[in-house]
Image: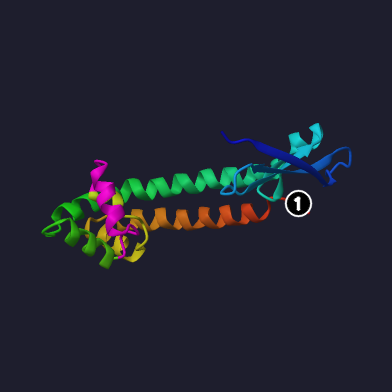
Amino acid sequence: MSTSETITFDVSACPCNAGRLVKNVTSQDNPWSGVDVTFSIDCPTCAADWRIDRTMMVLRSSESAYHSALAADRAASEAVDALVQPLIEQFVAELSASNKKALHAELTKLNLTSLSYRQFLEHLRKGRKASEAVTSRNLGWLSSLADAHGVRDQFEKLTQTLRSTGQARTQAGEQVIRRKIQ
């Protein structure tokens, strides 16, 4: 049975200077385990206002715009997926691939999947459709597919919205206040 030992070190004062930032080092008593290093905020006020993300403190109140932008970006991505998924399913069904290997090779050639062949087989073994392995990586191909089905204008509007929400998410992420723990 393994036991562990935790040692805590004061790192610095918290942002309000009423408490401390603490480094917790936990080590196991066996030679094959490494140490776990975590940080915590030993101040009720700052613990409510800040959160720890690895070696950074993040001001919770500065994240609300980012979370809103992230939700809008996900919604825009889902709207694009909802439009193209039936088209992709039809495309994959019409492919004349003789086997799974040939199907994966065709999807890879078109830059439609990031899955390795092993991951693709696992994907299929889990009962998922081959079309669900297709990602929106090749927007040019997706645009031509949308054009072939008469929904290019709708596709272009949705992808423009997706680009805009992605930029807004990036800008909101840059506004999140982070402080490195010394």
Is 163 part of what is drawn in magenta? Answer: no
- Where is residue 100 shown, x and y percent of the image? 18, 56
Quarter of the image for residue 168 reads bottom right
Residue at position x 51%, y 45% in the image: 72
Q: Residue pushed farthest right?
A: 18
* Residue positioned 24% across, 47% down in the render: 124
The residue nearer to you, when weighing 14 against 26, is 26
Report x, y in % for residue 98.
10, 59
Give the crowd class for mark 1: few <14, some 14-19, many >=20 residues within 10 Å. some
In the rendered view, does 169 fall on the left or right side of 24? left
Range covered by the magenta-colored residues? 111-129
Q: Is residue 44 above or below residue 123?
A: above
Q: Is residue 5 left or right of residue 150?
A: right
Name the image quarter holding the C terminus: bottom right
Residue 140 lies left or right of residue 45; in this view the side is left
Percent coordinates x, y for residue 11 in the rendering: 81, 48
Question: Whole-percent x and y of residue 128?
Answer: 26, 43
- Asked if residue 128 lies in the magenta stretch, the reply is yes
Viewer-proximal residue among 62 and 38: 38
Say above or below: 113 vs 9: below
Q: Name the residue nearer the viewer: 129 or 85.
A: 129
Frontmost residue, 3 versus 163: 3
- Quadrant of the image containing the N terminus: top right
Residue kind at label 1, given as amino acid type: Ile
